Amino acid sequence: MRFPTHYTWILSFLIFQRVNAIWLYLDNLSSIQEVTGLIADGLMDYYTGDQYGNAVGMFANPYYWWEAGGAWGSMIDYWFYMQNDTYLNVTMDALLAQVGDDWNFIPLNQSTTEGNDDQGFWGIAVMAAAERNFPNPPAGQPQWLYLAQAVFNTMASRWDDANCDGGLRWQIFEWNSGYNYKNSVSNGCLFHIGARLARYTGNTSYVEWCEKIYDWMAGTGLVYESSYWYFVYDGASITDNCTAITKLQWTYNQGLLLAGSAYLYNFTGEEIWHTRVKYFLNSSSVFFNHSIMYEAACQPSQNCNNDQRTFKAYFSRFLGLTAQLVPDVYDEIYSLIYASAGAASNSCSGGYDGHTCGLDWSHSGWDQWYGLGEQMSALEAMQNVRIRDRPAPYTNSTGGTSQGDGAAGTYVSPSNLSPLVIDGGDRAGAAIITCIIGFTIIGSATWILI
């Protein structure tokens, strides 16, 4: 599905697109493996890290570093669910190439613009590698569990009690636009990784952190609790003490809290987490139209940006994990995944290869949208049909082999800032990039609210 360089492909793409659909039989393993193989190939057509002069682990412009972390998480799932090692070595090389000098996913090439949420999605990917028994890195290289713990510890070190009585800021570095915004995805990532580390390691100190994060999110209104419905909103600014909540709802925020609660219930057995799983699942109905998943805040208006077009991938992944960890919601979740997977496969009928995936899975056939996010989302929906046949995430007492260190990430300065010399030009460049992202969020919010 690789296209000619730059924008010259557009005309040929529209002229030579094929309309033959791929046929997915959801109850046939060979069919699922064949179809997801095509979709995974399409996803990897956006990968440029294997080309001379390009950074290993990174995808083509305009895809950001955090989306690469999300994509490698999808490829770990592909390896596990489809039992296909085609991209095993590429995935391992990509993950290890971006760990940074301190083994905490703050590589030098990202250290002026990286946000807490960006780091979090790489942490989620390596946590999955530990839980799936993805082959361990060679001796002398950081191990998957170690990396997940390093991400958690460095993120937790940035907990900010001085503003809004707690919470993580969106940005790590103060010169970046968005530093004054505390968003659900950053805090949700910390909560989610902590819940998975608690279950994997058996260390209850992670549970205490999760309780702290959840209580803060609920206390500020980022998590809105009502009878039988728990909603997750986008974020709030410290300039008004986090009192004016941006009430956008995104699938990946919902999924982070849903699956995190599922991990905590599975580990602790405490009913409060069970209740939260059920209520987050109840309110997830806003992301389904006749059982077909969609991004409610931007998809109906056809206003989803590159980031937002990946969100359904993570939601499908988190739904699958929740179903495996909480048996009494399995049937409800599986029916949603099953319906969405079938619809997603119908959308993967575009491009000159005939298996380019679209954004709107309710559309009959391909809807003319395409990109890394569309491929990721369709792939995750389809491969999570396999939750009924593959084991639940491993722990270190049920077969998990990855080795870690509870103090990972603490062997550098407490602020975890790389020893950079930041001049005016660096600040200006970083500010321009993050301003563009910030204005995109604000613009999206305004558009949707109007």
Image: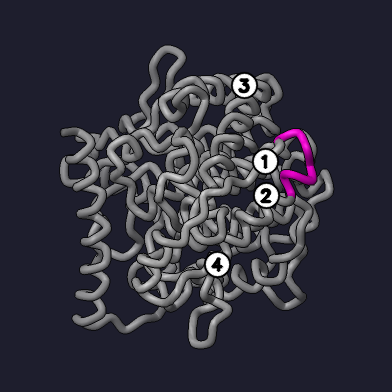
Q: Nearer the viewer, residue 427 or 347?
A: 347
> What's the distance in space between the residues labelled 4 and 3, CA to CA?
34 Å
Instruction: Specify whether 77 is left or right of 281.
Output: right
- Which stretch appears magenta? 26-33
Contact check, label 4 and label 3, Cβ < 8 Å: no
Q: Amino acid at mark 4?
A: Asp
Question: How many residues crowd mark 2 within 10 Å: few (<14), some (14–19), many (20+)?
Answer: many
Q: Amino acid at mark 3?
A: Glu
Q: Which mark is residue 284?
A: none
Q: Residue furthest bottom?
A: 53
On the image, the x and y values in percent for residue 338 come to: 63, 31
> What's the distance in space between the residues labelled 4 and 1, CA to CA?
21 Å
Q: Which residue is mark 4?
A: 45
On the image, the x and y values in percent for residue 292 come to: 50, 30
Q: Amino acid at mark 1?
A: Leu
Q: Is residue 197 magenta?
A: no
On the image, the x and y values in percent for residue 228 come to: 46, 14
Contact check, label 1 and label 2, Cβ < 8 Å: yes
Q: Which residue is mark 2?
A: 35
Disc nearer the start of the sequence (2/3): 2
Q: Is residue 151 visible?
A: no
Q: Which residue is mark 3?
A: 332
Question: How many residues crowd mark 1 within 10 Å: few (<14), some (14–19), many (20+)?
Answer: many
Residue at screen point 16% across, 33% down: 450
Mark 4 or 1: the one toward you? 1
> What's the distance in space between the residues labelled 2 and 3, CA to CA?
24 Å
